[in-house]
Amino acid sequence: MDLLEHLIVPQRGDSHDRPPPPPAPPTFISSLITIPPSENMASVSTMQTSVPFRGAASNSTENPLSQPHNSTVLENVFSIEDYERLNSFTPTSMNVRTAENITAFYLRCQALRLSPEIKYPGSTTPGWGAKLSLAGRVVEDDGPYPNKKEAKEKICGEGLKLLKELEDKGLITELKRKAEAGAGAAGGRTDGVEGGLVENWIGLLIELSRSEGTFEPIFKEYSAGTTFSCEVEIAQRPGQPFGGRTKPFSNKKAARNSAACEAVEWLRAEGLLPESGSPLKKKKTQPPSPNAKANGSPTRSVNGSPSGKVNSSPKGATDRPVSPDETESYGNKVVAKAKILGLPAPDYTVTASPTLGNGYWDVTVSFPNNPPYDVTIAEVRKIYGKKVAKEECAKRVLSYLIDEVEKKNAAINEKMEEIKKKNEAINEKMDEKKQ
């Protein structure tokens, strides 16, 4: 017979002194009863044949489960109510994850044109902390928190309090989108704090290079573990980059901005860049003179083009012809200089920038199969626009070829001087023989 059907044993008052266990349904006892490890299958078989079923008659005079060696069989038998009370299945409430503070904080920073920076000191063990840098203020929370998301949620909550404090003191004002176009230089933006200005340093360097016709700034990035560093070279100080490999940052953007900021500060200290405003200087057109109109002489704008029709012009006044060199591209100039050196047209290798992408290009130039010019002659990186990048690289190649042509001409002149001296020596000897 089934073992489960023999577990209901009539209570005997003379078996033990302890109170009888609470009754339980047969179907539930099967999951709660424990059999001592010392009991083997033989004892279980004996138990099956000795226990009566639901009070049925039995030939045995004693209940084997009431013996001392079987006393542990029903020790763990409880009623359903007692078992559920001792083993509650109610889930324990833990930390509740939410991003409410993060969302509210970044939306508020966006409205105020602020750029917060959050760092996460610590590790998985014992936990993470958070450090917020905003508007010249620093807020720290050592935690520890089990993950960065919870640390960010907490520090953003502190950031909201900081924003409210600054707004109450009148240190922060919301900027209007319409005023954004006229404020700052080259896409510059203010952070809304009195005396604080966050400018687009990289944009300033690019605008300056384009306004002066020089090569755009060259950024070289380095990584060491989880940190990044950057150097930037500009045309105004070639060979002496700003930034440095020993200045680590948590991300590439911060490293590039720091290097560009150093370059802009140096340019302003040298008087090569205005303290504020765009480096581009627009030429103002002069209004025509009333006397000039009365005399019938032509009036001209700054670029030399006539501003009106006239019947005659003053004697000797002629338009300056435009030089072909001013309109010719650097690529064509490179081809012309290469012919002087006996070189073919250069080979341009244009590839998308692996770090920036989205319209930024890297260009290298060489003269294949023409040593010693079969190596990389010039190189530019991270230039926006394929045509602009190629033209910028051609400008560097042209400078290199001009130096090579000068060296070649100097060598030719030196050789000619040697030949001239030899001829003079020969002529002197011929004159001596004639005498």
Image: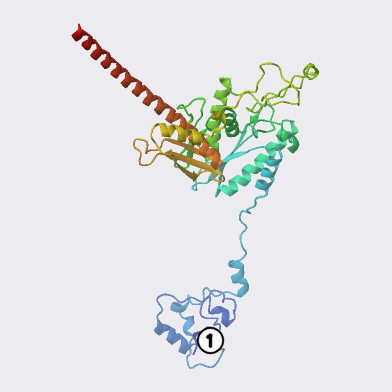
User: Residue 200 at x, y = what percent?
Assistant: 61, 33
Most distant residue in the front direction: 434
| Residue in front for this viewpoint, 258 or 155 | 258
Most distant residue in the top direction: 435
| Residue in front for this viewpoint, 255 or 372 | 372
Is residue 248 visible in the rendered image? The answer is no
Residue drawn 65% across the image and 50% down it: 99
Image height of 217 relative to 4, above or below: above
Q: Amino acid at mark 1?
A: Glu
Image height of 416 relative to 330, above or below: above
User: Residue 183 at x, y = what percent?
Assistant: 70, 31
User: Residue 157 at x, y = what percent?
Assistant: 66, 43
Is residue 338 visible in the rendered image? The answer is yes
Residue drawn 57% across the image and 81% down it: 27
Which residue carries the number 1 mark? 5
In the structure shown, which secondary structural element does the residue marked by tag 1 occupy?
helix
